[in-house]
Image (cartoon, grey):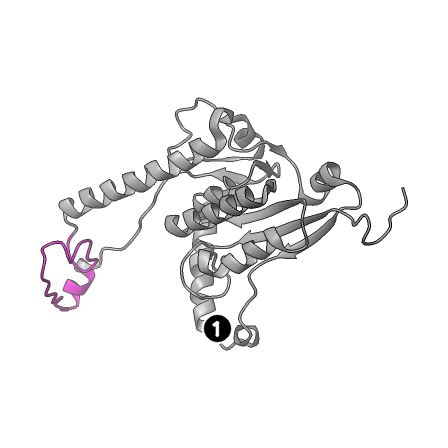
Amino acid sequence: MVHVPYLNPLPLVSVIRLQGMIASGSNPGRLNDAGLAPVIEAAFRRGKPKAVALIINSPGGSPVQSALIAARIRRLADETKLPVHAFVEDVAASGGYWLATAADDILVDGNSIVGSIGVISAGFGLHEFINRYGVERRVYTSGKSKSQLDPFRPENPDDVTRLRALQDQVHQNFIAQVTARRGARLAQDEGLFTGEFWVGARAIELGLADGLGHLVPVIKERYGEHVRFRHYGVRRPFLARFGLSLLNEAVMEAQERALFARFGI
């Protein structure tokens, strides 16, 4: 078949890279709905693509931003009637897996880490440290619950109970998202929603992923050998490229490394 430009244009697939920690804010490299909105909109609407592919490499982060991004992807997929395919690189865990559920199917590498469907909060208890150095903590509040989980005071069991109740609500929302999107593909396994995570083939057995596969060969198999790829992603701010926000980037990188380290990466 002879290709005639403009008369029979080659099929186009938009590729959105979702890499890094999911968090609100304007720091470069963070994934959030505000920063990704124009990227996602363009990927679905520019150039009449045949499909949208998500490349995901994220250890998670904010459940709110995860939900907002996934909801935006689904909303545009429904409006444009375009299929969405997710390809997991190193990890799609916690909020990263929430993003993957926005796709119609999820493909993983044999070594990809998938899952961690749970909620986590972490902090430090510093009251003994400041007491040792004679530091007095002074806090004045109006409302008995305004100083919950203060790291400079002894842990209050009532605060922990309230926190766990909030976590349970978010966890149930996460479970509802996975159940709604994966449906009958999910295995009946007690460990599925405990926060555990799995590698490649086991994730497929549990129904968290649909198969092994990488972006280029899978998309070419589905849309033709001569399919075109158009890549989209969040660009770093101009000044950040010249090292003018090194402190913020260093802090963010440390946070992100800590998240990835939970999965041995």
In magenta stretch: residue 246: no
Q: Is residue 32 visible?
A: no
Q: Is residue 135 magenta?
A: yes
Residue 112, image x, y percentages: 57, 40
Q: Residue furthest top?
A: 188
What's drawn in magenta, residue-wise? 129-154
The front one of 218 and 13 is 13
Residue plotted at (18% across, 64% down): 130
Query: Which of the image's four quarters has the N terminus?
Result: top right
Q: Position of residue 117 (x, y in %)?
A: 41, 38
Which residue has dot 1 on it? 246
Under mark 1, the amino acid is: Leu
Q: Residue at x 61, y 57 (%)?
A: 232
Q: Residue at x 34, y 45 (%)?
A: 120
Residue 113 versus residue 95: which sits nearer the camera? 95
Q: Is residue 98 visible?
A: yes
Q: Position of residue 247 (x, y in %)?
A: 44, 72
